[in-house]
Amino acid sequence: MPDLLIELFSEEIPARMQRKAADDLRKMVTDGLVEAGLTYGGAAAFATPRRLTLAIDGLLAEAPRTVEERKGPRVDAPEKALEGFLRGVGLTRDDLEVRDDKKGQVYFAKIVQEGRPAAGIIAEVLDSTIRNFPWPKSMRWGTGSLKWVRPLHAILTILSDEAGAVIVPFEVDGITAGDTTFGHRFMAPAQFAVTDFEDYEAKLKRAHVVLRSDERAEQIWNDAEQIAFAQGLELVEDKALLAEVSGLVEWPVVLMGEIGADFLELPPEVLQTSMREHQKFFSVRNPKTARIEKYVTVANRETADNGATILAGNSKVLAARLSDAKFFWENDLRVAKDGMEAWVDKLGNVTFHNKLGTQKERIDRIAALAREIAPKVGADPDLAEKAARIAKADLSSEMVYEFPELQGVMGKYYAKASGLPDAVADVAELHYAPLGPSDDVPSEPLSVAVALADKIDTLTGFWAIDEKPTGSKDPFALRRAALGVIRIVLENDIRMSAADGDLLAFIHDRLKVYLRDQGVRHDVIDASIAMPGSDDLTLLVKRTRALQDFLDTEDGENLLQGFKRANNILAAEEKKDGIEYSLDPDPKFAEEASEKALFAALDKAQPDISKAVSDEDFAKAMGVMASLRAPIDAFFEAVQVNTKNDVVRRNRLCLLNRIRTVMNSVAAFSALDG
């Protein structure tokens, strides 16, 4: 079986598009080959700034001959139905066969597809792939009609096996496929031929091209760490930047540069953000001072002066960028030292939402809500209100206008500069958290109060104007806000009502997703939500986890089956008789020993269960309930509920209702599967 190698060689592909483009190439080509009957052993796709590569091994040398039968319309069907069938199968009436069927005589078509060599199929599939490639943006160039993300210069397409390699004949928009490629644009630009993937990758590396993006990323990171370590410094981790930079170079060369002394006092977040966004530089930190003191840049070539000219140019551009940042910083500090109220007042001219008012009006709402929440989380109400009023003030600052991602971070610096206590200043940064599922949640009382107020205001506001998430659309990030409330409440063990009505149902839905991701069964969550107090998320989750743990035991699973049996019998008999068997059963009508034992077990367990539930000790309640398993099992083994004695029957049905009532006092067992 031959192996197939494809390379599409072009001008530089934007780094953000490379990974998806490689995946799209693999999927489009392999899907097309398989649809045409060419199966394969494995496929791997790669991307560099100037090339997309696909290697397929174990490809069939030709598509096998296939015979397919299709049932058509009845012989007496309308002529148009027959014509449509013939068009679909590509045959004539004379090619059809008439067979007897349950509904009469029916036309059958036999479609024979002769085997085809792989080369012809590959050419067709690749032509379609190139012409229909799903680039986010594409362009035309020259006089051709082909669209590609950047001008496409060459195509390599070869099939190789033990006998050697052959070019797959193929041409698109004047570009003829061959067996050659090119090395590094500057360091080894010459064209060279290859015979298979192993030969291709090895020759590329000799021509200063590292084909695999993960290898380029690993090389960049390792070299950068070593350079930093050698100078007693440490590299600031930035996975997103590493992924981007590895898509900008084919031959990574790591260089370390100096940051001008005038800029070293800038907040490290400012330096890191400015260098990352504008220059694609990694930040290098002094672990003793936590200051950003140097930067790492990644060049795409080696130079005779070991990168000195590159660094000189980069440092010059960086100085200009950081001069702007320093100007913003100094201007903002002058405002902050006079108090942050001026910035808050400016937010009165900034619309938050046309139905929810300005940012300043929103701040007023958050401040009032933070004051209300504060006692419930152990925070001082006056400080909570004060912190809420300055938490978003930095939205008016010059630095945040330039770098919106620094909102909150800069607010903390400016609040401290204005003389506010650290606990109040920290709120500016922490009240946005958590922004993602892996982010830490705030734990300091002031930050907790304002973070909750911020998210609750968002949820209640958009709920009030009926702007709720629909399907996958959530333009105001309300799902994230709800998850933030859930995590802050649960991780800080806060006891408060989350919401009510439709909004509570929405929060419960997000809680279900959150708990299911932790392995909690959906029906266990439903059984807990159905209980009183489900607006208290901490109480709800406490009950849910205890129920999950209980059902994971043999006693719990068997007791659930006993409950289901009792509930099913009771429901059926109540429906048949048209009454509810909700009276207290009387032990004097008990005839069987197991029946009397069940009465005794319920008498003993019920008060203990009630007290445990009242104390919110659900684990203890479940433990007591486990003692009912054996007497319930024994009851169903020995006792016939629907006995001929009506008095005894009614008493036994009331006894089943007591089982149901006792168990449902802990959780809604009727909502559980099983």
Image (cartoon, grey):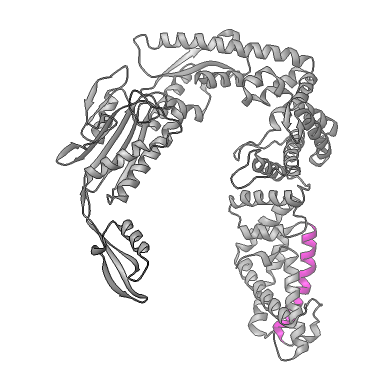
Query: Is residue 614 inside the magenta stretch?
Result: yes
Task: Tell me if residue 169 can be seen.
Answer: yes
Residue 259 visible, this angle: no
Q: Position of residue 319 (x, y in %)?
A: 55, 10
Q: Residue at position x 67%, y 25% from top? A: 409
Name the residue nearer the viewer: 550 or 111. 111
- Residue 377: x and y in percent read 79, 40
* Left or right of 228 on screen, residue 419: right
- x 81%, y 42%: residue: 376
Q: Residue at x 14, y 41 (%)?
A: 163
Q: Main secondary structure of the magenta part?
A: helix
| Nearer-the-camera pick, 186 or 69 | 69
Viewed as shown, does residue 665 lie left or right of 438?
A: right
Of the pair 116 and 90, the residue shown nearer to us = 90
Seen from this angle, which residue lies furthest front? 79
Q: Left or right of 302: which side holds 221?
A: right
As drawn, 135 above or below 301: below
Q: Is residue 444 above or below residue 588?
A: above
Q: Verify whether residue 608 appears in magenta.
A: yes
User: Residue placed at 65% from the left, 75% from the top?
Assistant: 565
Q: Quadrant of the C terminus?
A: bottom right
Say left or right for 441 vs 218: right
Q: Residue furthest toward the left? A: 163
Range covered by the magenta-colored residues: 592-615
Q: How many marks?
A: 0
- Residue 583 quadrant: bottom right
